[in-house]
Amino acid sequence: MRVCVVGSGGREHALAVVLGRTAEVVVTPGNPGIPGSVSTPPEEIDADLFVIGPEQPLVDGLADRLRERGALVYGPGADGAQLEGSKAWMKQILVEAGVATAAHGSFSEVEPALAFLDTMHDLFVVKTDGLAAGKGVVVTELRAEAEDAVRSYLSGEAFGDAGRTLVIEEGLTGPELSVFAICDGTRAVPMSPATDFKRVADGDLGPNTGGMGAYSPVDIATPAIVDQLMADAVEPTLAALTKRGIDYRGTLYAGLMFTPSGPKMLEYNVRFGDPETQVVLPRLESDLAALLADAAAGSLGPGPTFSTDATTTVVCASENYPKSPRTGDVIEGIDAARALDGVDVFCAGVGAGPSGELITAGGRVLNVVGRGPNLAEARRRAYAGVAEISWSGMHYRTDIALEASQRSG
Ligand code: AMP
Ligand code: GLY
């Protein structure tokens, strides 16, 4: 089978490597650190299966355009992608499907938004309705900061049109969980869960990012909890989509928080998570190309199986990420990291310098993945890999998977 992966980040690198176990893979546009990258647009590529990585092309209808040409595509059409393209719409679907989520309201005017903020306490959450590359969410204990976000979002100053409608939510606390459900339009099967670290600095401090690291499996996400999530959230959501005439074939990424009053859905995304994919897929024992092709064809078989090994990924980010990342720094040490036992490196924001050397070309640059028989060893290996890598201004969190590895060994 020939598979075309659409996208250019660490998630797509991991997809390409794991699909490459059983298929021929081409990645568009990819990046200079991902083998098999081509600049040909997806519409001009001949493939048995297209796997679309990021949300923006899904929201823009790439899956629909490819399907119109008769292609087999893993990824929802623009209709289903609205789950991620509009948080207000996603919240409506959650309520319709009876899924437990944070109390919320959507607003496009300042005064009602501020009045709603006044009904919240302790933790204020303000989100852009539209896509903002993982950066449109403010979670703060300071009402003044939440008010600033409301004003700068609604004026269009902070995120353009993506912020002109916003969602305000009750702040929840607890460990987070990402579960990727593989959907074929009517059925869904879960992948092994992962936990992502969203804040830029150790101790969950600093601004939210696209994700600074992840680990899998997650001890607190027992198979019973995952089954319950499928029955209480994913299946009713698919049914709510079907009721609206939406044939959802792709990943339904459930982002949950384990709150003191039980798991609650923070969000759905319509694609695999980044960097969670980089820890989930390497543990997959089933044939990924066959799994995604079956989902795309509307004929999912039994759910995938996973190794009992653990994985941890640490994101190495460029100077000033997430604010205004500096690019163009020369990256050293990828090969030395890959030479270590149980270590792999996926390339995300990577470009090529004048003599073909790899340079930083984005905020999140590399995902160093450690794999081992338990989480403590996976984590140790990931950080041993990180120690081999350097560029000017590189930074990373030192506490990825720390607590969980102390819990579960
Ligand atoms: P989202 O894009 O909606 O997943 O939000 C990004 C991140 O913001 C989440 O992964 C959480 O870390 C945080 N977050 C989102 N919603 C809430 C909430 N209601 N309470 C606390 N943190 C939240
Ligand atoms: N890691 C979070 C996301 O992919 O949205």
Image: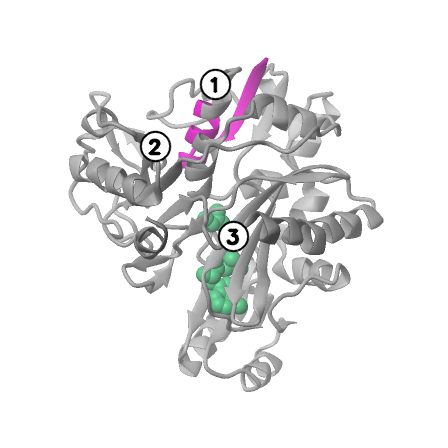
Distance from Cα at disc 3 to Cα at disc 1: 29 Å
Q: Quadrant of residue 347?
A: top left
Which label number is shown at residue 221?
3
How many other residues sit within 10 Å of disc 1, few (<14), some (14-19) or many (≥20)?
some
Choose between 397 and 210: the one closer to the eye.
Answer: 397
Q: How is the image coloured?
A: one colour
Q: Residue at x 84, y 50 (%)?
A: 243
The answer to which of marks 2 and 1 sits earlier in the sequence is 1
Which label number is shown at residue 20?
1
Q: Position of residue 203 (x, y in %)?
A: 29, 63
Q: Residue at x 51, y 26 (%)?
A: 285
Q: How many numbered circles does the render carry?
A: 3
Q: Classify 67 as above or below 196.
A: above
Residue type, label 1: Gly
Residue at image mark 2: 347
Q: Position of residue 281 (x, y in %)?
A: 47, 33
Q: Quadrant of residue 73?
A: top right
Residues marked 2 and 3 touching at CB (< 8 Å): no
Q: Position of residue 375 (x, y in %)?
A: 34, 44
